[in-house]
Amino acid sequence: MSEDPLIRKLALYSVPVLLCLTAGTQRFMAASHDLNPWKGGGYGMFSDIHRTHYRVIALKPVDENNIGYVITVPKLFERDMDATRALPTTSRLEALGERLLQQEWFLAGPPGNQFPIIRQQLFRHPGAKPVKLKGMTVQLAEPAFDAKSNQMTCTVVKSVQVSGGQ
């Protein structure tokens, strides 16, 4: 029995082509349609809590009197925050803290709050008092799962102290 060359080529190349189409569709859906890269195509058995959007950057600024503030980070720094979450090096954390300290900050809420909020100049209300920051702690935290206690926690993995300001 002689084999047809066309059937032989189809049998030889159909499986690799089908696998490449499946992988390409998976990558396309993950890149453009908000599909988790670990799901779809049977990959859902994996679980990953260390993706960049689960990482948290905590900013703890203090003024000359060591009063701590809650800071609202402007959209201007969104790209810096995302880059720092994606590649959290000590130098990136320091650079982010230094850039934030160079900004002009104003008290955003009524005085006497337990945790006063500060905002950048663009978003201040009339009569807002300026706040001079002397330093900031910049921390990167990631979720951690403890299988023994079945608890999810947030663990600080990097922390830097930046001093300076306006």
Image: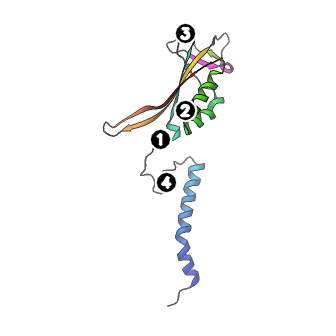
Do the residues bearing badges 2 and 1 touch, measured as CB atoms within 8 Å? no
**In what element is the residue under mark 4?**
loop
Q: Nearer the viewer, mark 2 or mark 4?
A: 2
| Pointer 3 local density, CA inside 10 Å: few below 14, some 14–19, many at least 20 | few
Q: Quadrant of residue 28?
A: bottom right
Q: How far apart in space, not on screen, are marks 2 and 1 (Cα)?
A: 18 Å
Q: Nearer the viewer, residue 93 or 81?
A: 93
Do the residues bearing badges 2 and 4 touch, measured as CB atoms within 8 Å? no
| Pointer 1 local density, CA inside 10 Å: few below 14, some 14–19, many at least 20 | few
**Residue 130: where, in percent of width, then height?**
64, 12
Residue at (56% x, 30% y) in the render: 93
Find residue 90 and name its label.
2
Q: How far apart in space, not on screen, are marks 2 and 4 (Cα)?
A: 35 Å
Q: On the image, numbered disc 4 is attached to which residue?
A: 40
**What residue type is disc 2 on?**
Thr
Q: Nearer the viewer, mark 3 or mark 2?
A: 2
**In what element is the residue under mark 1?**
loop
Specify which label sits upstream in the sequence, 3 or 1. 1
**Residue 30: where, in percent of width, then height?**
56, 50
**Residue 5: where, in percent of width, then height?**
58, 83
**In what element is the residue under mark 2?**
helix
Q: On the image, numbered disc 3 is attached to which residue?
A: 65
Q: Nearer the viewer, mark 4 or mark 1?
A: 1
Q: How far apart in space, not on screen, are marks 4 and 3 (Cα)?
A: 54 Å
Q: How far apart in space, not on screen, are marks 3 and 2 (Cα)?
A: 26 Å
Find residue 99 and name its label.
none
Q: On the image, numbered disc 1 is attached to which residue?
A: 50
Residue at (53% x, 75% y) in the render: 12
